[in-house]
Image: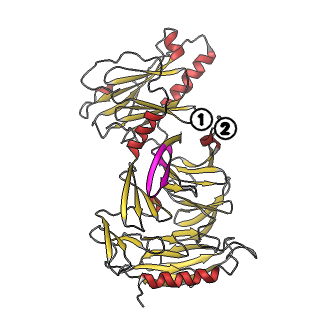
Amino acid sequence: MKKHRKYLVIMLAAVMAVMMLLPACGGGSGADPVDSIQQNVAVAKRVYIDQEGSVYFGYNSVICKAAISDGQISGLKGIGAASADIYALTVYDDALYISQADGLFRYPLDMITDNDTAWKPEKILNYTDAPGENDFFEIFDDRIFFLHDGGLYCAPADGGELTKAAADVRDFEVSDKGIYYLDNSGALTVMKTDLSETRKIGDMGSAKQFTVSGMELMYNGGDHVMAFDVQKEEAEEIDTEYKPHEACIPWSNGTNTLYYNADFKTLLTGSGGSDRKIGDTSFPGKAYGYLYKDWLVFAAGRYEKLNVYDLAEGVISSFDIRKGIKADLGESGKDSDPEPQPAQGTTGDYDIGENFYRSTNDAGDIQYLYFNDFMLILPDADDITYETHGDSVDIIFVPGKNAGYGGRLVTIKAYDPDDKSYESLPDYHVAGTGPNTGKRFVAIYPTDLQCSPEFESVVIRYKDLKDYLYKIGEGAVNSPLQTSDSSPAP
């Protein structure tokens, strides 16, 4: 029978009141009461928020950290760089776990606090035997859980052999009470955390995914938004004014429910039986949003913005990541131009050095060079610099330059979209097209040694740097050069 949300909340509150007198499910005698099935689970999504209100997210391959307070995000800092685009991240056991385009890595938190200036990421999973599209995973009891090859898998949090927990799985959530998963028939099943036993507890029909709200699982029932109470093991309708869009994944803070209808209007259930419209566009799927207190933080706009939905007040605020990065670079106090700084060239009518910014990670071993419509990620070392020449920039190996051998590692040159004259070059890689300028950027490599051949250590260093830059390529997951709005240039 259809019920109003306020009655559901009252019933849930009554259940929670009884729970306060009982040991927590999944814990021993005297354990703390549970108010959410996710209380001991590290949930990794495009955005992660810890208990102190620190917001972590990836901007292309840059690891970012900000703060959330009163529904506003502020104080963005670039705290490091991954080796490829970042899909999802979370903190577990004093480490930052990041799912990247080239695997799942563990980064020690000391890299953020500057206690360890020689930090190195550790690869936990290769994406040859784990999901390359993995933008959602959870860590519980020293195991990583994720979807792969149509099933639910887990692996040790410090790396190791994969275990298939269940086949034919659409979605899942891990908890102290058990592992809840939805199969392709719509059946909702709970599995013991040791993977030893399963039990069907409900049916979600055509629902693709579900989200967690306290002890409830929120899902799209087709004609209605639904809430499945994991304690009563019953589903109840949420009294909404409109039918949810078929692709909508609803969210709730326990009182109000956020959803969008067929017209892509974002709506919030109200206590008076009518819904409040709080937006004209839909929000992305489950892996892109993180619910923290009453605020649902979503990565949106090609990951250039963080939208904050206040589920208590029914308002939306937006944080511009690109502007936050520019502010971080401007306020970092770091040198905005590496030395030596040559005079700008005047070739053509396009200036590749316009709107140039530079930043380094906190560890001081990686530098980000933001040129006009692209970004270069390079080691932060005294033997690397750059020289701009209007529509191109040379990345220079300083010892080779000083010794009179040129020192050029690579040239990044901007071409008009219809200019393919670079195809006659002996050694080049197309890096990508900048969306703001429409220019195509091409990496052009020297064909001769650009450093003193008599010094073996210098030659080895030069070749190592050139090999690093030789990874530049359009769409390459580990490319040191990134386009497609990776630059904060206006």
Q: Where is residue 3? Give x, y as percent.
A: 42, 87
| Label 1 CA crowd tier, 10 Å (few <14, some 14–19, many 20+) | some
Q: Which residue is mark 1?
A: 363
Residue 312's image quarter? bottom left
Between the C-alphas of marks 1 and 2, the distance is 8 Å
**In percent of the image, x 31 and y 22: which residue is there?**
390
In the image, is residue 59 part of the stretch drawn in magenta?
yes
Q: Where is residue 439? Give x, y as percent.
A: 29, 34
Quadrant occupied by the N terminus: bottom left
Query: What type is the residue that disc 2 sits on?
Result: Asp
**Which one is in front, 65 or 132?**
65
Task: State how many labels appear.
Answer: 2
Q: How is the image coloured?
A: secondary structure
Q: Where is residue 305? Give x, y as percent.
A: 38, 51
When the figure is inspected, residue 334 is found, relative to residue 450, above or below; the finding is: below
Q: Which residue is mark 2?
A: 116
Query: What type is the residue that disc 1 sits on?
Result: Ala
Magenta segment: 57-76
Circles 1 and 2 in contact, beta carbons < 8 Å: yes
Q: Where is residue 83? Give x, y as percent.
A: 53, 41
